Image (spheres, rainbow, N blue to C red):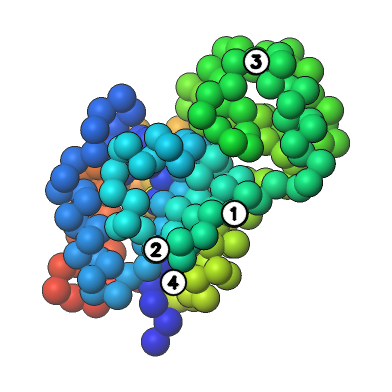
Amino acid sequence: MPRSVIASDLDGTIKARGRPVDPRVVDRLAQAKKAGVTLILVSGRCMKELEELLPLSLFDAVVAENGAVLEAGGKTETLAPRWWASERERLAGLFEPGCERVIISIPREKSAGAALDPSRARIEFNVDRAMILPRGVDKATGLRKALRRLGRGGRLVCLGDGENDLPMFRLADVKVAMKNSVDELKEAADYVTKAEDGEGVLEAMDRFFPAGGPPRL
């Protein structure tokens, strides 16, 4: 039987924004992995930040920078077109780039009037952040690449809370939005948790991946 796959966002999903990861959530995901579930982290953050926030060895693959960077099987790959480097350099001169290697992440309020070439770049929002990405790159494209790299199929369960999770929701067999999600994601979800953030993830795991039993998908 193909393995089930959980693809989850981090901030506002696995953990509350501005707070550390609850060890109970890490333990619950580890139980699912031990039971044969493939785990993929899909985040807008850079790899450096992710490494500081939780044990990435928990995941079979990590999709970082909103789909622009993939780490799987000990190999890290940039998932942006070759021409993006020069375009990013131009855009980086207009903003204050953070730790991201490919995208540019800025406060949402600073995105108004951004001088973008719409044929090459676009803005995707994530609650209070705005991410400038190469056109054609999002969480769904990164997740597809991760699944191909791992050679994994099976029922795909996606967990998220922000607007930038909508693309990967379109790939999912089961779409789970946290209670604290934006309205657009709740409307697209198959299930909206009654609890927020990590507590919502624990709730979803109990519902769809009960400990000691088969997945309920």
Disc 3 to disc 4, C-alpha distance: 40 Å
Relative vertical location of residue 10 with respect to residue 7 in this rendering, above or below = above
Dot 4 or dot 2: first in sequence order is 2
Identify the element where label 4 is drawn. Answer: loop
Disc 1 to disc 4, C-alpha distance: 25 Å
Residue underneath mark 1: 77
Count of numbered labels shown in the rendering = 4
Residue underneath mark 2: 60
Disc 2 to disc 3, C-alpha distance: 33 Å
Q: Amino acid at mark 3?
A: Phe
Camera-near label (1 vs 3) is 1
**Direction from residue 34 to residue 64 in the image, left or right:** right
Disc 1 to disc 2, C-alpha distance: 15 Å
Residue underneath mark 4: 155
Instruction: Return the x and y of residue 12 as percentages of the image width and height.
Output: 35, 35
Disc 1 to disc 3, C-alpha distance: 25 Å
**Residue 95, label in figure:** 3
Q: Amino acid at mark 4?
A: Arg
Disc 4 to disc 2, C-alpha distance: 16 Å
Q: Foreground residue, 217 or 11?
A: 11
Q: Residue at x 22, y 61 (%)?
A: 30
Q: Residue at x 84, y 28 (%)?
A: 117
Instruction: Return the x and y of residue 215 as percentages of the image width and height.
Output: 28, 73
